[in-house]
Image (cartoon, coloured by chain):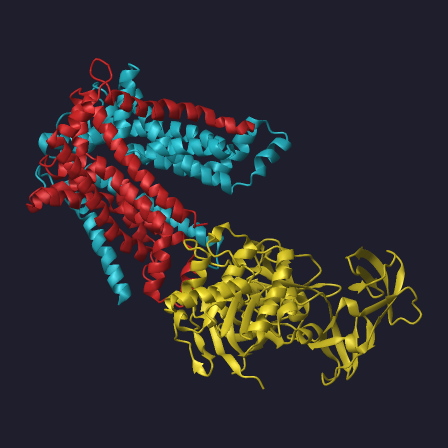
Amino acid sequence: MADKIIDLVHISKSFSGKKVLDDINLYVNKGEFITLLGPSGCGKTTLLRIIAGFCKPDDGCVIMDGSDISDLPPHKRPLNTVFQRYALFPHLDVYENIAFGLKLAKVPADEIEKKVKKVLKMVSMTDYEDRDVNSLSGGQQQRVAIARALVNEPKVLLLDEPLAALDLKMRKDMQIELKEMHKKLGITFIYVTHDQEEALTLSDTICVLNGGKIQQIGTPTDIYNEPCNSFVADFIGESNIVNGTMVEDRKVSFIGHEFECVDEGFGCDVPVDVVIRPEDIYIMNRTDAAQFTGVVKSCTFKGVHYEIFIDTDNGFEMMIQDYNAFEVGSTVGLIIKPQDIQVMKKERLANVFSGTITSETTVEMLGGEFEIPATTLENGTEVEVEVPFGAIDLQDHSDDGNVGGEVSFLLYKGDHYHLTVVADNDENVYVDTNDVWDKGDLVGIKIDPKDIVIRKKDE
Amino acid sequence: MNKRSSWTIPYLIFLILFVVLPLILVMVYAFQDAQGSFTLSNVTKFFSDADAMSTFALSIEVALENTLICLLLGYPAAWILANKKLNKSSVTIILFILPMWINALMRTLATAELFNMLGVQLGKGTLLYGMVYDYLPFMIYPIYNILMKMDKSYAEAAEDLGANPVQVFAKVTLPLSMPGVWSGVLMVFMPTVSTFAISEFLTNNKIKLFGTIIQENINSSMWNYGAALAFIMLIIIGITTLFSSDDDKQVEGGTV
Amino acid sequence: MKKFISQAYLWLLLILLYAPLIFIAIFSFTESKVLGNWTGFSTKLYENLVTGGVQGGGALLRAIENTLLIALVAALFSMVLGTIAAIGIYNLKGRKKQAVQFLNNIPMINPDIITGVSLFLLFIFLHITQGYTSVILAHITFCTPYVVLSVLPKLSQMNPNIYEAALDLGATPFQALRKVLVPELRPGMISGFILAFTMSLDDFAVTFFTRGTIGLETLSTYIYADARKGGLTPELRPLMTIIFAVILILLVVIGFTQKKSATRKNPEA
């Protein structure tokens, strides 16, 4: 068992009332390359800033090498950061930038020179000592930023989206170099990115974050092959995600067919999410041995493989990757092997909001008032309101709904979209719809009263 | 040259007529006698006039002192204003800028009247006070501006590399704010070295500054001598600007 | 503790900055000719100011009128000239651009007295009679650079293709200017106009040297002459108070609306 170098315990953080980190528990082993991965606004950068000390958690503590460093200011923490836009000091040249930390630590001048030369060699920037940092290209600035952090021999190196500003080719080269540097130096790297491919390439461990919560921690292969929920499945790589039902152990039904799988212990007739990677669907021109059939809708060459969209016999759209091309309009046979079917427990089956009865036919929830079927509950009663995903009606303008909201996440489920809408009061509303929305769309939320179920809150 | 760049032409003509030509005229008049023939006498007259020379020295001295006091008072104020932890309200900065919008003569007169009422003897002390009072906002504003715009990741990077708060300020914040300091210095030094009304008000005409001499000569139709004095001031201004823009460039070259 | 000292320091400076203004404002509500001598509350000075019942007839009112008129005309001309110039400068390249920008900086760097004396010499040299025209020309000279500097950043923020897009969609260059460029540049033009207007209002030295001998007075030159005669016309006190109040209200309103629009644009912040 490797030693823990950093242990984050029950970390929570809010900015002006909005929770950006919600009870994060995470440890990092000595020498590990761990990546905090997630979409923008998921809290990954805040978490990194808490480790670096630029940001104090509201709750919880940061433990490093067994001692609590939560109250230590950044300049006393034995770790260094490579900043997102490098933050090289513009009034200093390359040498002075790199020597900055050593000079503060009162290292003798001749030793500083030795160390700076050495680290410059490591990042292949020898002979750039006297250059003005603004005359350097993005990639070169990046190298200087890494050198400036590494020269202090930190126990942990924090990297905040260090490659985000580079072009694709440069990014790929730097990824390889970073990986080699990590191997050679043997120090711990904590890396923040929103680029899942980068995370899969670089990391020993990936921690997927969304909405301030850890979604999954695991090796790149674990995360790719066995995503634990539909967010991770959708965020990492391409995938087909559809609703299904676990009929019994090792038998799951989705897209109107029953399949054998390897999952057990869900119970009988339990709704689940099913994930199938596009490269795991076998496609062929013969249909006699197929589990199900489909019609090819489009077939696009992607360099190595073809990306094929098909409509299945029961009207679901699926994406397939294959080395062969298939004619558009032709009927194809399809097979999915049991071990390639990833079954996930559904996080929720319907929306449950808490609300307050305001009259016989209205309830207050989500920061607005909604009509409900007539109730006998008294005004002011605290209730649980259950609304099916499909019962929520999204309007084009936020003024047209009882409350407004913003589309924050979309998931295509083969025959419909599953949306996460953040209502104005910051509660999440989950919606099934056939309409096409985009992330960031402002919508109005309406609910048909007849679909609402009211339950008195348990005392 | 594309077509729209030719839109510069009207303004260019205007600038040549109303900026370049007048400055050339200052030079021409400075080296002419009343009959219009070339002479150095205007300039030599200044250098041999002990009174004018001491006034000149005093003007520079007062301007330097004023600039220094404004800097010493203004930098901390700008720093506090730009620091979100120490100053949350945006009203305070408005209050500091506000006096810049009120007629300088009025403000000066108000100060002079206040001194009168309090029975304070008008002299160099009141002159400096009044000047600091008039020009402090012009020092605070550019420094505040550059501190606000400064990417805070520079300070964080310095902290990350082991600098304590004092070192962060000395090694990163201060050097990076130098362009703001220089423009503040220019905005304070230039008008104070050339002012005439303010010194007249605040010292009850007891202390004459260089600007007053220029004004007196021009107003009493001694145009050539007045022009020569203006020319000397122009050289001072030119030197100050070159000096500061040189420094400016060095730091600015570093600020992206 | 640190916060307390910082706040105390700021407020100390503010008290020093505002003491004279507040002092004038207080004594604008009494009739006394001598400052500091409270003879009971009265709004007589305000009435005098409005009705022109000031000593020396309506000279003060005329000076105010002149000041506003000159500022308005100069700021309008500066706005038009400066905006056209900014579009031109933005499209210039290399040395030419630097040269024009250098020239544009001169009036801003030049102390007022140099601008005043040099323009005075120009008008003498060209035998132009000095009066309204010379003062307005002089004000345009030192105001326009501020308009140029306010409009230039808007040009670089603007998508450079929108002008071409308008032409492509069939607009004539003038229509493209009026319907596409001007709306985009409007915020810069307005702040340039306001800046020019206040610079003109505030000016003393340039007006002083270029107004000639026709007896043209602006507020600044009036105050200067008044003070040299010894003593401030009492009616200047209410005037100063009114100006102070108007600016205070304007700035607070601007600050408030900016804050509001900023929070609307970025509700999470």
Is residue C37 found left or right of C155 in the rendered image? left
Name the residue at 24% across, 21% down.
B31
Using the image as rendered, state which of residue A9 and residue A114 is in the foreground: A114
Quadrant for the N terminus of chain A in the image: bottom right
Q: Position of residue A14 (x, y in %)?
A: 46, 69
**Relative height, residue C264 to residue B123 (above, below):** below
Quarter occupied by residue A183:
bottom right
Q: How many marks?
A: 0
Q: Position of residue B177 (x, y in %)?
A: 36, 52
Residue A397 seen in the figure? yes
Name the residue at 16% across, 32% down.
C48
The hue of chain C in the figure is cyan
The hue of chain A in the figure is yellow
Name the residue at 15% across, 39% down.
B58
Is residue B249 found left or right of C132 in the rendered image? right
Q: Which chain is red?
A: B
Q: Position of residue A160 (x, y in %)?
A: 53, 64
**Relative height, residue C43 to residue B161 (above, below):** above
